[in-house]
Amino acid sequence: MKSLRRVFGLTMAALLFFILLSQVGATPPMQSWEVTVLFTHDLHSQFLPKAEEGGESGGYARLKTALDRERAEHPEALTVDAGDFSSSSLMRTLYTSQAAELRTMGALGYDAVTAGDRDFALGGEGFAQMLEAAARSGERLPAVVLSNYRPSQDNPARLDLQRAMAAGGLQDYILVERGGLRIGIFGLMGQDAAACASVSGFALGEPAFYAQRCVDALREQGAQFIICLSHGGTSERKKSSEDQQLAKSVEGIDLIVSGHTCTKLEEPIVEGDTYIVSAGADGEALGSITLFIGEDGSLYLKDYRLISIDGTLPQDPSMAALVENWKEQVETSYLSRYSLRYDQVLTHSPASLPRPEGSWESALGELAADACLWATEALTGERRGAPTVAVLAAGALGAGLPAGDLTVAQVFDVLPPELGGDGASNGSLVSFYLTGAELRDAMEADASAASRIPGGQLFFSGLSCTFNTHRIPFCRVLRGSLQEPRYRVGPDKQLFTQIDDGQLYRVVANRYTVQMLERMEEYSFGLLKLEPKDEEGEVLSELSQRTLTNQYSDPIEAWYALAAYLSTFEEEIPASYCQPDGRKTVSNSWSPLQLLRVTNGVSIAALAGLAVLTALVALAFRLLLRARRRRRYGGGLRRR
């Protein structure tokens, strides 16, 4: 009996030993997960709601309400943003000193954000200063992830910028955990976005290469789900859809939150095993996506929604108070020098004046150009001297004006100052001289070359022109003359003066427009050349000494010129400003009298070329007839 028990005990021990041994090195049982990501992009400093037809959209106090509701349903949700969290609003004036945008995103509970081109609008130095200011606040902040955009090798401040960004917490990627799921998040700058950040002083690393590097590093560190915050964007044309191409090229990205193109995707784009999502711009919607991760790692879409941020949502009181605090700081640190307040009403507009989108004529463009010309006298205290005109490029206009009361903040958005390539504000007004012939070339640049440059359309004050779009490029202008601006003669009277090609005329523009004019030679293949000059006709090498200043020697910004001009309309903007006034006449006629009119050297060369071509065609036709006649009669020999 004892031996039987002994055998049984040894058998059970051996069995237990082999069972335990079989578990060594075995794969643990697979587990499924559910992950919810709340996302935005291209917020553009939309701290406050913006007026739209039928109501309002955006605003961080309402966004906070929407976020709180979603987190109540999904306590483990991540909140991320794909870049361009800042933009050219009055709040931008706090960017480098207070980091208002990033600190507010911390208060909104964002976990991670990346940067876009607009976040570099004050240069790489401005971006680094913003990060440092945010870090100094000691507040909860989102992680800033950006893996492929760093100071260029030839940037003299490269080392200082690298130190500042490291101190400010910039990282390639982060690894977080939600409900036991390890999630990797990395950031990318897109190719088109980098091209738009012309003053950053940064260099772009190839997005797909750096994305794969981040994915591989995160997988090695145990990431089970990977999110890419990309400021590359999507497009209806798949070949130019940067984030779709990224998903095709890089293995292992589960979700791409796509910014830059301001796209609003009602359904996710699925590229291979990658989901691509976008929620639109200016905080008009909060995106929410919930994905189920199967035991084999496969992704399944459980829920996708775009939650409208509009007047149906109540404003969160704490966030509304924070936004009011930022407004007060803007008034103290920036607007006080102009004796203006953030929400101060300047005048009333009987109609909306939209931002020009590729159109030759624009009521807003004409109003802003008139304001710049008016400022040369009203704000500088100068007496009228040489004939003066104003020129303004469409790209300088950042927003339209709504119907109704117009506030200081809304007017600032129309002509926001940015940083130019030389480090100076490109919103400052400067004055220089062009010859009459160059004024005609400026009109020709608008008629022929501007359409090839985004934001290149030009709007004039003090000039009138007529051009035909069916004439060959660079000789489309039929007539051009000086025109007294409407604020001098009234909306119903027109006074014209002939332009003298050899005379010098004073030109007022913001620096952005000057940069656009200087590019016209490139885009006209050298046919149009505009060289800013001084009073003596000497070509200027730079314009730093040509800035218009007020009586206190402060530079006059274009936005303030517009604000001051609008404030002269005590009750409302004249109705004549609510539509183009005809100072620029665009003809689409096929009349031979217009098409064949000689206007400049290009038209002479074109007509000469046409005459030569006509002669060659006539000669060829005559030789063809002669050859056919010879073949018919045996080469010209008579038969006997």
Image: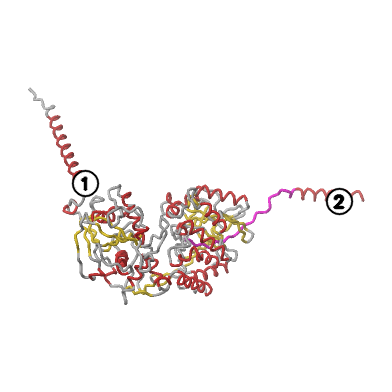
Secondary-structure class at tag 1: helix
Q: Is residue 626 above or below residue 590?
A: above
Location of residue 540 in the rendering, given as x and y in whole percent from the top left corner: 33, 54
**Residue labelled with disc 1:** 606
Tell me the quadrant of the picture where the C terminus can be found.
Answer: top left
Give the residues in magenta.
Answer: 22-41
Whether the magenta-drawn stretch holds residue 276 is answered as no
User: How far is mark 1 from mark 2, CA to CA?
Assistant: 109 Å
Secondary-structure class at tag 2: helix
Quick one: label 2, few (<14), some, or many (20+) residues within 10 Å? few
Whether the magenta-drawn stretch holds residue 34 is answered as yes
Q: Which mark is residue 9?
A: 2
Quarter-wise, where is residue 634 in the image?
top left
Label 2 near label 1: C-beta < 8 Å? no
Q: Is residue 221 visible?
A: yes
State the count of labels. Answer: 2
Mark 1 vs mark 2, foreground winner is: 1
